[in-house]
Image (tube, rainbow, N blue to C red):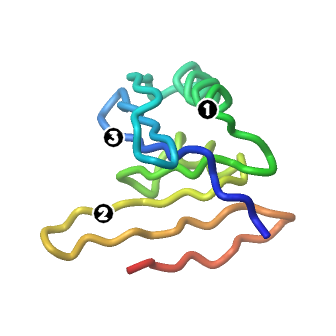
Amino acid sequence: MTARPRAFCGLDWREGHHDVAMVDQDGKLIAKRRITDDAQGFTELLDLLAEAGDSAETPIPVVLETSRGLMVAALRATGRAIYALTLAGSNSQVLHLPRFTGGSWRTAHSCS
């Protein structure tokens, strides 16, 4: 059985930078930072995740507003759950992005 994550991370996707917010299991804000869309920003994101208790056993899931880009590819490589949130009027949906595990891609599915 997979342990429940200690926290949840959301990325507000922007051109050139991203705003990160992390909340604990009760929804309390525990971290907030603006990161750049490059290797330095990704390192800062990993540091924030680690400070919030991220581990191989209980990786912190990440929700963001896109399913493409280098940041998404780098996050996929960490093996954590990643969810792309699309806000299209009243037809909002969350897409669980595939993770690269053991040489094969898991099938993505939409959560409603």
Indicate the secondary structure of the residue bearing disc 3: strand
Marks 2 and 1, Cα distance to the nearest angstrom?
Answer: 26 Å
Of labels 1 and 3, earlier in sequence is: 3
Circles 2 and 3, Cβ within 8 Å, touching? The answer is no
Q: Position of residue 111 (x, y in %)?
A: 44, 78
Q: Which residue is mark 2?
A: 86
Q: Please tell me how crowded label 1 is: few (under 14), some (14-19), or many (20+) other residues with Cα within 10 Å.
A: many
Q: Three-letter amino acid code at disc 3?
A: Asp
Q: Which residue is mark 1?
A: 52
The residue under the point 53% across, 40% down is 71
Q: Earlier in the sequence, mark 2 or mark 3?
A: 3
Quarter of the picture holding the C terminus: bottom left
Q: Position of residue 84 (x, y in %)?
A: 42, 60
Is 66 displayed left or right of 15 in the figure? right
Q: Which mark is residue 1?
A: none
Quadrant the N terminus occupies:
bottom right
- Is 64 placed left or right of 25 in the picture? left
Residue 47 lies left or right of residue 109; in this view the side is right
What's under tag 2, amino acid-wise? Thr
Of residues 20 and 65, which is closer to you in this image?
20
State how far apart marks 2 and 3 are (Cα): 12 Å
Choose the circle earlier in sequence order: 2 or 1: 1
Quote the CA–CA distance across marks 1 and 3: 18 Å
Front in this rendered view, residue 37 or 57: 57
Q: Amino acid at mark 1?
A: Ala
Q: Quadrant of residue 105?
A: bottom right
Q: Closer to the observer: label 2 or label 1?
A: 1
Which sits in the foreground, 1 or 14?
Answer: 1
Q: Please name the residue that numbered disc 3 is placed on.
A: 12
At horizontal 41% and vertical 22% (from top left) the residue drawn is 33
